[in-house]
Image (tube, grey):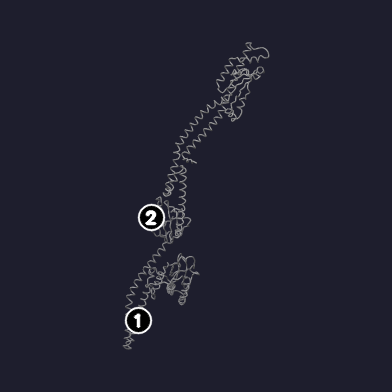
Amino acid sequence: MRVLPKLKLKHKITLSIALLVLVVVVAVNLVFLAGSVHQQLQDTFDHANFLAQEIYNELGQELAAAYQQGAMPAGPDALAQFFQGRAQSPALASLFSAGIGYNGTIRDVALVSPQGLVVMDSNPLLEGQPQPRRRLMSEVLDSGIWHQVQAVVGAEAIYSVSLATEVQQRPLGTISVGVDTVLLRQALFARLHQLMLYGGLIVLIATALAWGLSDLALAPLNAISVQLDRLRSPAHAAASAAGSEKGDELGRVQSKIQLLGEEIADARQVYSALQENVGQLLQGLDEGLLLFDAKGQCVMASAAAPQLLNLPFSSLAGRSVADLFPGDSSLDRAVRSAVREGASLEPVQAERNAGARPLLARLDVVRDGGGQPGALLTVRDAEPVHRLEGELELARRLSAVGRLTRGVAHEVKNPLNAMALHLDLLRAKAASSGNGLQSGMQPHLQVLSHEIERLDRVVRTFLDFSRPVELQLKPTDLSELARGVAQLAEAEAASLGLRIVVRAPQPGPRAWVDRDLVEQALLNLINNGLQAMQPAAAGCRLDLEVESEAGFAAVRVRDQGPGVPAEHRDRIFDLYFTTRSTGTGIGLAMAARTMQLHHGSIELEPPGVVPGASFLLRFPRRAQETGGGAGA
């Protein structure tokens, strides 16, 4: 079976318009046909009726003339004889011929006697014969249009238009005009044929116009198809090029829209996955990120941004830079100006509000796929940065001290050994020389021996400080460790009239530490705090607090002594730096070194309302230790 090729849209449009015009033409012709049938019947009836009236008038004139001329026969049959004699009337014969010749739809004209015999007919052969029974044409006119059409286009029939005549209430005869439907149909079809000719011409003209204008009508579809090809990716466009050429213009556009919809769906899935990944990434950032578009509207924000800027998270997206930074601080003015001008902003430290924590802000200009400039604002807390810089500086100083101590220990150790050896020889010679000499030199020898031992202890301290330490790390409950250290120092505190208060959750946060080193570091801090509070009144306390931070476990040692002077805060962790006459300057340096070995930090916190020194030790926690207070 042969399959017909699919029509193109142009052919469909042309064929549809042609069929539509054809239907309109046919409908108009049918309406015209119905109207023409009725009009033709009415015109024919009027003409036939007019012809009958003329014949009636002529009969009246001839009857009047016969009475005037005395030619009227006498007797009761005078009217019948007069009517029978009308067959020879030239005037009536002329009217019969003129009526048939003037209107081609009239079949015949006749005078019929009261007995039904044809007295005079346009066809002389029918004279003297009975008049055939015919349906009145007035009945056809009174019926519906469908019956009128059936009467004209159906089988041949002759309808009659009759006019009865009377004289002195006596019937004279009937004037009958016969109308043939064949003649009506011929006259009607002549007019309808002309109308159909014009209708066919209109259909042809409409088809030609539709064929020519279809290109103009389809031009937008072709433009849409071209735009769709531009929107689609080259890979998809090349893969579907063969398929898109099949079918008509509308089918190709529909196919391209479907393919473009599939690409958009794929892109939406990729975008959703990317948006989710970006959201997870932004949630994990400690920095505050704000992305502004070319109009200065915030389109994306990280989870840390509302906390740093003290704004509700739900109100960031969709707000302008002027709404987010409306203040008169240097930071607000700089960010507003940089975003509006599309200029980069070098890292700047400022406070949004008086007394608030300082922020570090940087703004970078970014551009989207269309080349529109946007801005990426990065905001971070300045305190951790400064703390990290301080820890790096401390590590640098400790490293320098370590190098120095190794060199000093190496240079001093050998002379000390020689001095101790010769001191022993000198003591032996003094002992053999006599009691007087020995008793006189003994105090000096003891001083020399004590100083040499002290120098040797200092050198050992240097070596211990600079020697690599192998840590014995174990998961440790810092609350339990703090309580143990407090018990070790309670006796010393009680002897000074002081007390140690431990504030630690049970169970406490856990961290991997070398217990011995951390205990010694805490003891050094506690002893320093107790000695700092010794001149104060009895009843002062030293607070030992354990708490959890984000990713860290912290231990705070806070005393109520005079605190650390501002000019000494930068050197407090230097080896051998001390402000007490009896201090060694080793305890804080060893504590700092212990925290450095644990990859943690030690910080002298800023002075608060209550006087005293507060040291904060932070221990990093592993991922499995951050789930709860005492997670292992």
Q: Amino acid at mark 1?
A: Ser
Q: Residue furthest right?
A: 76
Please say whether residue 150 is visible from this viewpoint.
yes
Residue under label 1, please give it: 449
Q: Amino acid at mark 2?
A: Ser
Please tell me the numbered disc located at residue 98: none
Callout 1 crowding tier (Cα within 10 Å): few <14, some 14–19, many ≥20: some
Residue 103: which quarter of the image?
A: top right
What distance separates the C-alpha of mark 2 from that of mark 1?
Answer: 69 Å
- On screen, residue 438 versus residue 83, left or right, reads left
Query: On screen, 563 above or below 68?
Result: below
What residue is rendered at 55% in x and 29% in y? Answer: 33
Query: On screen, 59 above or below 456?
Result: above
- On screen, residue 104 versus residue 486, left or right, reads right
Q: Are marks 2 and 1 in contact (CB under 8 Å)?
A: no
Does dot 2 land on a helix, a strand or a loop?
loop
Please tell me the numbered disc located at residue 344: 2
Query: On screen, 376 above or below 477?
Result: above
Which x, y percent locates residue 450?
36, 80
Which x, y percent locates residue 442?
34, 85
Please say whether residue 602 is visible from this viewpoint.
no
Residue 438: which quarter of the image?
A: bottom left
